[in-house]
Image (tube, rainbow, N blue to C red):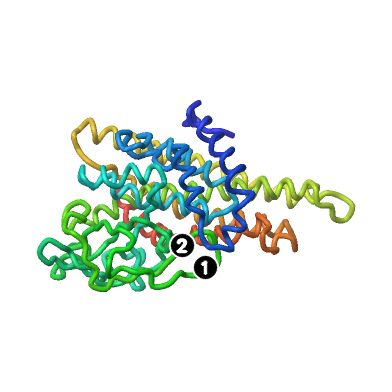
Amino acid sequence: MDSIYINEDHVALRDQLARFIAREVEPHAVAWEEAGMVPREVLRKMGNAGFLGIMFPAEYGGAAADALTNVVFAEALSQSTFGGFIVTVLVHTDMAGPHLVHAGSPAQLGRYLPKMCSGELISAIAITEPGAGSDVAAIRTQATRDGDDWVLNGSKMFITNGVHADLYFVAARSNRDAKGSGGISMFILEKGTPGFRVGRALKKSGWLCSDTAELVFEDCRIPAVNLLGLENRGFHAIMGNFQTERIALSAMAVGHAQQAIRLTIEHTMQRKAFGAPLIDKQTIRQRLAMLEAKTEAARSFLYHCAWRVDQMRKQAHEAGARGAEVTREVSMLKALTGELVNEVLYTCQQFHGGMGYMRDMPIERLWRDARILAIGGGASEVMLEEVAKRFVTA
């Protein structure tokens, strides 16, 4: 079933990505899981194909596409059975890159964005800390102004692309006297800057070909021109981009669910037990049918949220305002898809029997990779609280 939001250009993009994944990813990515990273050559190929700048401005090498097109991209990318590959790309395109696009000065955009579109530079977003995850206002990494420089001290945790990134967008507290969400700024940090190091590469249950790191800043001195956006307004930038990030992760969840159902239908048609294919068992085919119905419903909501973002951006542009507020809908979507993909993968793995528990089986890999989608980018509980806070105004 396709969506009323899909057009011919979207279909072409989806088909192009499917060919890329079949040729460049699926035959090779088991080795990437062992290595703990996606080869940069593959990401440069994606950049050359135009995949890394879907929503970035055309004058810097992007496609200047809308949110709907970006969801088509994220959903098509998520047809890969390697979640670590998918998130490596989406962190660069949907979670880190937009900070530069939305707040970068002309000089910053000109220096970094063309190389980000081409895949020459791969980026990471450094917000989470050992004591501050979804509670962004609790970050403790300090940024102190010293003449023409800022000096960073502190650490970050669970940073995707953190080991091998070339460019980091770092959130730090730039005003120690400000309380709560006030006094946080964003900074651009290049790999190799003195005082900055990868504390350790982190081992995870899933997303094995995604490099994840603890980052450490010890008197890390960066030029004042590396301030990204307005001083002490970083919290608002982070909150604003959460919509893009959470829609991307929701698309990833939908893509995982679609693939799991497809693999399980194929498996139960071929696997025989008690003299007949498993699909002949009423309970199996009906549970798969219900999971497919739920996935299609979630997919429709996903596309509707992207459409809402586009509509509100258009209205804001016409009114001369800035930003789009769809926090309620996107929070619903993130909670819904994060929980649904885990329900789908639990059942689909169950229907694969013992083979579903074997490493390097696609269904086992999807099962491992799905778990984080109810945690990362805003845990389901946090998302549901965002919805509940808006009951009065809904």
* SS state under label 1: loop
How busy is the neighbourhood of tag 1: few (under 14 within 10 Å), some, or many (20 plus)? some
Vertical relation: 265 (above or below) 220: above
Give the left or right position of residue 179, taking residue 252 as reference: left
- Specify the farthest residue to the top: 8
In terms of image quadrants, where is residue 319? top left
Give the left or right position of residue 332, taking residue 150 as reference: right
Vertical relation: 92 (above or below) 66: below
- Which residue sits at x=23%, y=30%? 318
- Which residue sits at x=84%, y=52%? 272
Q: Give percent across and percent down for residue 112.
A: 30, 47
For badge 2, the amino acid type reads Ile
- Specify the farthest residue to the left: 147
What mark, if any, has residue 126 been given in the picture?
Answer: none
The quadrant of the rendering that contains the N terminus is: top right
Q: Give percent across and percent down for residue 144.
A: 16, 68
Residue wearing tag 2: 375
* SS state under label 2: loop
Residue wearing tag 1: 204
For badge 1, the amino acid type reads Lys
**Whole-number angstrom distance, CA of label 1 to CA of label 2:** 13 Å
Q: Closer to us: mark 1 or mark 2?
A: 1
User: Earlier along the polypeptide chain: callout 1 or callout 2?
Assistant: 1
Give the left or right position of residue 22, taking residue 145 as reference: right
Query: Residue 130 or 341: which is nearer the viewer?
Result: 130
- Which residue sits at x=32%, y=47%? 98
- Which residue sits at x=26%, y=33%? 315
